[in-house]
Amino acid sequence: MKAVQTAGVIPEEKRKRMVQADPDHLDQCSTEEIRKILKKEQRRLRLQKFYRNKLAVLGFTILMIVVLGAVFAPLLTKYGPYDMEVVNRLKGPSAEHIFGTDTFGRDLLTRILYGARISLVIGLATSVLALVVGMVCGLYASYYKPLDNVLMRICDGLSAVPASLLAIAFMAVLGASVKNVVISMAVVYTPSIARVARGSALSVKEQTYIEAMRALGARPSNIIWRHIAPNVICPVIVQASYIFANAIITEAALSFLGVGVPVPTPSWGNILYEGQSVIYKGWWMILFPAISTAFSVLGMNLFGDGLRDVLDPQTN
């Protein structure tokens, strides 16, 4: 037997339809339901704002093309990144080798696609590692004044040296490998994340509800990670997106100078390094890797600008 509805009680599905049709019916919902509705509406507005930004959509499209090319590289080309055909060395672009071949007869398109994997992995790992370490340093520096003086002076010292030179110095000490490239660039770019996190956390720290939490005896770690960090994460993520793009350029520069990803690992910087000696005979070895690098960095920067517009509370 069907249950009889109590007078004055609105069924769940009907109440949801009423709220979707007319926001004035929010008074019929509980506090938890209102919170869920507002969060859903906020996500919808942010996505709508992102899609209205044509340059951000273009950047996201470029980034997806690079990611898909790197992931499905084995399906897009019949050659391997290390397959050599010495008789076909330095062959120009053709139907068989769309981007031509390099000095060892390896298919250049294949090496560029597999090199995108290296660049994306290094860029992602660098930005994530710099985000985590920089976030921790920035949050604790904003909350503890003595620690602030120490950490920020270290960041000042690291920021005083150009990023490329500092990365080269670390690579000279650590040695050439993908892991060491990530470590050296994470150290180089962590100060920028720490500064952004510290600046945002200082403004949040002065809010009334943070003072109330301290007055109630809340633990500092609880205040930092549950009440300050969520309000700092958005500008930090935007900064990390720019670090992603900068890491791709820095990795290519390090590999081009011979202190980055070791040869014969396919890397855009390694391809440029090999092409510099045959630039007049094999111009395609310089042109196509350079276009790939610029294409990826452009897409990431445009996507980062879109994230900034969507996540920054001041622009909202």
Image (tube, rainbow, N blue to C red):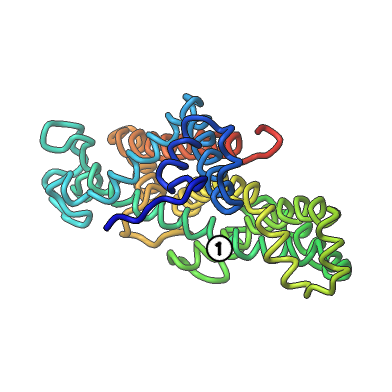
In the image, 153 versus 240, the foreground residue is 240
Q: At 21% across and 37% down in the image, what residue appears?
A: 100
Q: Locate the N terminus by quadrant.
A: bottom left
x, y percentage for residue 314? 71, 35
Callout 1 crowding tier (Cα within 10 Å): few <14, some 14–19, many ≥20: some
- Tell me if residue 301 comes above or below residue 269 in the rendering: above
Q: Residue at x 54, y 50 (%)?
A: 33
Instruction: Give x and y (percent) for residue 178.
Output: 43, 64
Label 1 sits on residue: 129
Quadrant where the C terminus is found in the figure: top right
Answer above or below: position of 114 versus 88.
below
Q: Nearer the viewer, residue 98 or 169?
A: 98
Does residue 183 sit above or below 34 in this rendering?
below
- How many numbered callouts? 1
Q: Determine whether 38 is above or below 267 in the image.
A: above
Q: Nearer the viewer, residue 174 or 293?
A: 293
Q: Amino acid at mark 1?
A: Leu
Residue 210's image quarter? bottom right
Q: Position of residue 168 (x, y in %)?
A: 58, 58
Pick whichever, 225 or 137, lies toward us: 225
Instruction: Give the residue drawn at x 45%, y 57%.
Output: 122
- Left or right? Give the position of 302 relative to 106: right
Give residue 2's quadrant in the image: bottom left
Relative image position of residue 118 (x, y in whole percent)? 37, 55
Residue at (52%, 50%) from the top-left corner? 247
On the rendered structure, is 29 left or right of 80? Answer: right
Relative placement, left or right, of 68 versus 237 is left
Element assignment for label 1: helix
Residue 186 falls left or right of residue 110: right
